[in-house]
Amino acid sequence: MVLERYLLIYNRASGSDNINSLLTEIVPIYQEHGILLTPFCLNIGSKNDFLPLLKNDDFSGVLISGGDGSIRSVISFLLDNSIDLPIGILPAGTCNDLANSLGLPRSIKDAALVPLKGKKLAIDVGLINGESYFFSSCAGGYFMPATYDTPSRAKKNIKQFAYYFRAATRFTSFKPFDLTVSIDGNLHKFSAIMFAIATGSQIAGFNNILDEAELTDGKLDLFIIDDCSYLELPNIVFNIFRGQFSNQKHVRYFQAESFYIDGPMNLPVVFDGEKGGRLPLSIRVSNKRVRFFV
């Protein structure tokens, strides 16, 4: 019997440590389906350690277990090194935006079984300044540090709501900023509280924020919250995360293939929930760039 080989890359520090206990369960299941699952722990080795194996065509699929940040890091590494293999996501983070946008099960064990069905979907990704990627969202605003400086214990206990409780403590200190955005070449100017660009309908752990967004439509989706009072902001944010912002007077929505965003250089920006770069940013869609098991 000739077995296929899949590489399982996991970060045991992401979210929970469920993946460690599940390895003894899922490895035999894969073997029964003719697939030899080889685990690789990111907490011990570097990504360069498994690159020669993938370059030599030893593997026909890659599974990644971790949060959105770990998953972004690994997939970006694969793209940068021209590794084109179908990817399975085992969600182990706080929000798991990419996994949820793909419609994957929320439990690691159930998600680990999805690749065995063999169904794949090629999705759009965001290309940043022609050199890096995001797979669910890119966002900017002065309260964005709440996404990466929230204590780990709070994230484990109350998941994505930890971000919003932390952000809520800063509502009165939010300040607007001047934002210049080129949307498919058309220039717009705003006084904004925040902006977010998404590849799909999920942002920061909440489903169906952008009903019009699709992972395969060759478009990116941008929403901007205009300058408003801190008394109005909580209600606006609440309605956005309920997917009800089309009639919000302080919310703008655009869909396009490319955006050029300029504003304050010190404005905090996050890519897939992790601390990102600085403005200005040139962002465009890379259509159906990565294949995922679904």
Image: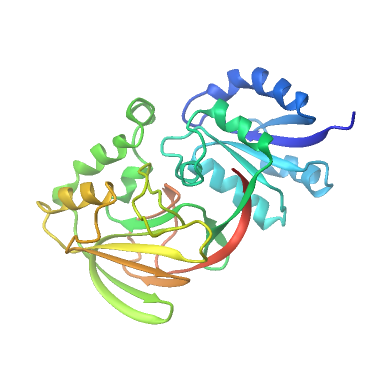
**Quarter of the image with the C terminus in it:** top right
**Between 33 and 190, the one nearer to me in the picture:** 33
Quarter-wise, where is residue 248 in the image?
bottom left
Count the numbered circles shown. Answer: 0
Q: Is residue 274 above or below residue 91?
A: below
Q: Looking at the rendering, which quadrant does residue 132 occupy? A: bottom right
Q: Position of residue 147 (x, y in %)?
A: 36, 44
Taking 124 as reference, is 112 above or below it? Answer: above
Q: Answer yes or no: is residue 6 visible.
A: yes
- 235 on left or right of 254: left
Q: Residue at x 35, y 43 (%)?
A: 206
Q: How is the image coloured?
A: rainbow
* Relative horizontal placement of residue 102, taking residue 268 as reference (left or right): right
Q: Position of residue 162 (x, y in %)?
A: 30, 35
Q: Is residue 12 visible?
A: no
For the N terminus, give its image quadrant.
top right
Residue at 20% over, 61% down = 247
Q: Position of residue 14 (x, y in %)?
A: 50, 32
Identity of the residue furthest to the bottom in this view? 186
Please tell me whether residue 280 is drawn above or below residue 209 in the rendered image. Answer: below
- Specify the farthest residue to the right: 1
Quick one: 280 or 1, which is closer to the camera? 1
- Give the vertical position of 120 relative to 255 (above or below): above
Picture coordinates of residue 176 (x, y %)? Answer: 20, 63
- Residue at 48 percent of width and 71 percent of height: 257
52 left or right of 246 in image: right
Tell which of 266 and 202 is nearer to you. Answer: 202
Residue toward you, 10 or 177 = 10
Q: Residue at x 38, y 42 (%)?
A: 148
